[in-house]
Amino acid sequence: MSLLVPEDQLPVELTPFAAVEAAYPAEITRVTDALRSGLPVLVEGEKELTPYLYKAVRDRLKKEGRSFLYLDGRPIPELPALQPGMGLVATIVFYLREAVRGAVNERVLVLPHLDLLTTSVGGLTSEAREVIPLLYENPELVFLGFKDPSFPLPKVIENLFPRREHLLGVPRERLRHLVTQRESRKLSNARALKGYQLYKHVSGVNAVRLRRLLSTLSGEDYPSDPKPAERQLRQATLVGQLTLPDVDLEKDIGGYAKVKERLQKEILDVLALKDAAADEAQMKAVEGLIPRGMIFWGPPGTGKTLFAKAMATSLGAAVTVVSGPELKSKWVGESEENLRQVFTRARQAAPSIIVFDELDSFATARGTYQGSGVEHSMVNQLLTEMDGFRKDELVFVVGTTNFVESLDPALLRPGRFEFHLHIPFPNAEDRRAIIRIYDQKLGLQLSDRGLEWLVKKTGDFVEGTNSRHSGDHIQAICRALARMRLREKKTGPTELDDIERTLSSYNERPNLTPREERVIATHEAGHAVAALFTPNSPAIERISIRSDLVGALGFVSYSEPASRYVVTRGQLLDQICTLFGGREAELLFLEDLSIGSAADLDRATAIARALVEEFGMGGEAVGVRRFETDEREPISDKALAAMEESVKQILEEQRQRARTILDENRGLVQTLRDLVLEKKVLDKEALASVLPKVEKKNPVPSDR
């Protein structure tokens, strides 16, 4: 098929019968040849195709003297009269019985509603149990059966048909025969049909329905922009739960520049090259490179499904989001059938994307799942459906998962889910972009200080959990701010105080006594001053004793370190020194200790142990090696003692170092403590007026 078909080479008019003949000539020929040879044939296609396909086959074989009997439930004069009040299925069974047992000559018996004899899960109805013996009873009969792809058939009935034809949509090369000249003028600004461009919007539509849709096209001839006409067709092709999303990859998804770049280059740009192909050979070459299966993996709430919808929007594709658990059924075969129906509907509405949310719920590695075993059958059905894709139909499968390592390896090989896209928790730049999007959409009018504080706050763990902030968490925070503005009828900018009040108004804060506040303020001031005078510690962003961090009466937060991927010994030692700052401040200024230093001491000890046992930085006494508990090479008592001594020495050196820093800067610690007691919270701007600008030239302690 040429990429451009001149208008004068298109048909002027088309009846539905002519359209079916033009769309499926090869399929009709194969059906006719099989029936001529005495082989039963099962045709799987949508119901509206059945009478037209039957007529095409009958017209060819009637010329050879073949006779047909069409059992669709209507009276047949040559057979006995019906009993009053019989329903459709009972009528079909009645006529089938009469035809099978009364026929003496070879004829083709047509069953247009074969699927009505089964239940929705492929089981046998009472009528079907009577029909099955009849289908096998008379060898002089040749059956032509029709079934809709939405309904399964029991194997015992399918096995009757050695020849099968599956009709879904129309072949791409036949599309030029199904568009009239009048319709072509609605779809192009040139006097030619852009067949490949049109096919991508109607690849799953059967010939009869396609003719109905094309005949209703409205609008001007030779439009400057054919997209409105294409949208008319697109909306009419949606079936079931498929929807056309409207998610812009850049405008609606903040940050994630590398993720977007990979999706754009690997998928969207390649598909754009397909649309821009100069000839059919080039287009087919591009189609062979497009991955149809994709895994979007990462933590919960990071936007995996949103990226799939953005991809669909870029392609003009429909989306159906399917949850793995909802596909499962306790009935044998129904889970696989549910899966098959998802693919059938998606192919009918191509271009489309099937998003399997929580793919790991049924596609875990075979042999590892302890369930009923239906998951294995579902994996096999999924692989079968994906292997059955035609290269010219744009149907993609996106599986989202939090645990990509648990998926069945058979899914991950090339040709199936070969494209893997990691969507991690958002970094600071991503969070800033996400917040700006919600700021604009929700009308938050965030001040610069408020925005940056939110970026910093969402870099920490979500309060009360071990999870970092995802895009969903950020959206929830922004929605809470929008509700606050609505309640308070706020019209001005959202400031930092508004954000703090909104996010902490429902926190259960302890009622601290003045003495308790003084202890906490002294402790946090000690941390801050120790960090200020250690060369590898990041800048201080915020000090609080307002209990607005769950699990902490007070805290000091820091900016992100300049070096996040290379961690040095000096950085680790400075961390230990800073951790001792709170404890030593209490001893120096209060001459007592609270148990609030327990967590600091635990972290400091863990870092010191890592220096000695994992990183080979424990000094000459323990040597440069990694210590691991191993039965083949147990650690000697002498080595254990040396390790403990080295850990103790590191901790004591950094404790003394913190003590010296605080002792030398008593006035600064007291000033900072008193200001924290007064303000409760000090942000970066308030700290700048108190803390001196320190050129961090303190030498990093060298290895002993």
Image (tube, helix red, strand yellow):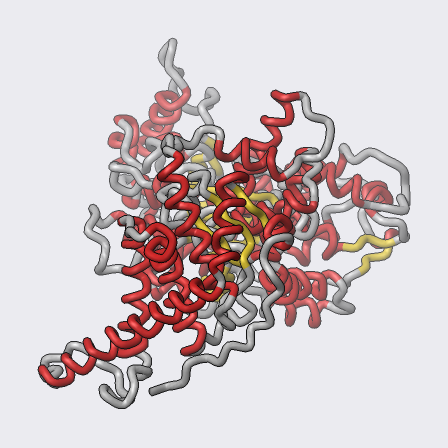
Q: Kindly indicate the quadrant of the structure image that contains residue 628.
A: bottom left
* Residue 326 pos. (x, y %): 37, 38
Residue 39 shows in the view: no
Task: Please give left or right for residue 472 compared with residue 494 in the image.
Answer: left
Quarter of the image with the N terminus in it: bottom right
In this rendering, the answer to whether 321 lies above or below 291 is above
Total number of numbered labels? 0
Which residue is rendered at x = 50% and y = 49% of the image? Answer: 543
* Residue 348 pos. (x, y %): 56, 44
In this rendering, the answer to whether 469 lies above or below 114 is below
Which residue is rendered at x = 36% and y = 40% of the image? Answer: 327
Q: Kindly indicate the quadrant of the structure image that contains residue 376.
A: bottom left
In this rendered view, identify the residue nearer to me: 24 or 315: 315
* Residue 372 pos. (x, y %): 20, 46
Q: Residue furthest top?
A: 84
Task: Please give left or right for residue 563 compared with residue 315 in the image.
Answer: left
In this rendered view, identify the residue nearer to me: 236 or 164: 236
* Residue 81 pos. (x, y %): 40, 16
In this rendered view, identify the residue nearer to me: 563 or 77: 563
Residue 301 shows in the view: yes
In this rendering, the answer to whether 274 lies above or below 135 is below
Which residue is rendered at x = 27% and y = 54% of the image? Answer: 598
Which residue is rendered at x = 37% and y = 67% of the image? Answer: 576
